[in-house]
Image: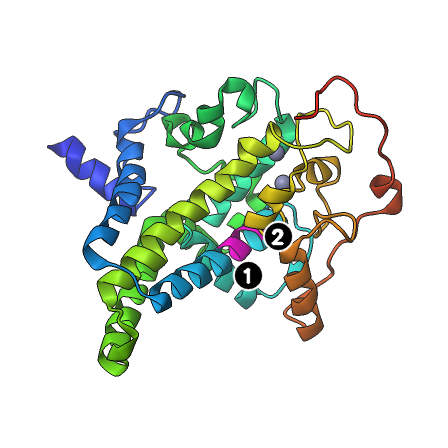
Amino acid sequence: MNRVITSVCNYFDNEHKLLSVDQSDHSVDWHRIIPFLFLHLACLGVLLVGWSPVAVAIAVGSYLIRMFAITAFFHRYFSHKSFSTSRTVQFVFAFLGTAATQRGPLWWAAHHRAHHRTADTENDVHSPLKGFWYSHCGWFLSGAHFATRQELIKDFASFPELRWLDRFDMAVAAIFGTSLWLLGEALAWLAPELGTNGWQLLVWAYFISTVVLIHATLSINSLAHWWGRRRYDTRDDSRNNFLLALITLGEGWHNNHHHYAGSARQGFFWWELDISYLILKMLSWTGLVWNLKPVPDRKKFAHQPVRGAQQR
Ligand SMILES: [Zn+2]
Ligand SMILES: [Zn+2]
């Protein structure tokens, strides 16, 4: 019973006593997988709530804004510091990224920095060399990768508001989901002709949108190291893939990114669609972000015939 209570407390407070998490165990931890399975099963709620055009539209908006928070901020800003912003904008997008239910900004960026240091070696956090499903979701469902690797994210861990988001990430997701429920109830009251309500928005704009968002993001760890073309002969097995770039707003140019991770843009050439970079560029005109780091020409044009890895 004690263990059950600790588990439930753990879901909402990552620094609660870690009785149930073995930090040396790389196998899937059933305690960690329960909320992940619950997210998927909750999508079946669609059988009860039905659909409406407005619910689908808000689900798409919920996906896009949180995907932007993940790719532009969790990845390009917190992990790689490829542009600058104010503390307020930093917090707003850290909050929206945490609402994507992929843990908090410090946990996410620290594990990603570890990935770059050891990509596709036996020390990599999530290389497909350890098996496709391990690279996709097995790694973060294990006790070994539960804790935030504080030593890799000291620069941002000095902000108490980011430590708070990191510690109570599931509470942030609950606030986001509750806000969508309230919005749906308000629409049902103010504009009943739209045919939506709180439960319908919760299922579409939180559960379904979040599950698609999580798997799209995870595909960069799994598929983008396995399927696509290699322009640069990087030490890892990263790939460029247009389809993945489209669904992740630019993250699919992953071989480019492993070749030069310090740039705010991942589509290095005009024909490589990188929606997050285009939005960052527009935000820079408003002054909300600045100092977007470019790709140096010596890096951009440094591609040679790629040896040792087949094109899939
Ligand atoms: Zn990678
Ligand atoms: Zn990266």
Find out whether residue 309 is within the magenta segment: no
- Residue 83 percent across, percent down from the top left: 68, 56
Q: Residue at x 51, y 48 (%)?
A: 157
Circle nearer the N terminus (2, 1): 2
Q: Secondary structure at mark 2?
A: helix
Give the amino acid type for the residue marked by disc 2 in the picture: Tyr
Residue position for label 1 = 90
Residue 247 visible here: yes
Marks 2/1: CA–CA distance: 9 Å
For residue 158, above or below residue 308: below
Q: Residue at x 30, y 71 (%)?
A: 183
- Residue 262 percent across, percent down from the top left: 72, 45
Q: Residue at x 33, y 49 (%)?
A: 170
- Residue 235 percent across, percent down from the top left: 72, 24
Q: Which residues are magenta?
A: 67-71
Is ligand 2 closer than 8 angstroms to the Cβ of mark 1? Answer: no
Observer-nearest residue: 23 or 196? 196
Residue position for label 2 = 77
For residue 288, above or below residue 220: below
Magenta-drawn stretch, dominant element (helix, strand or loop): helix
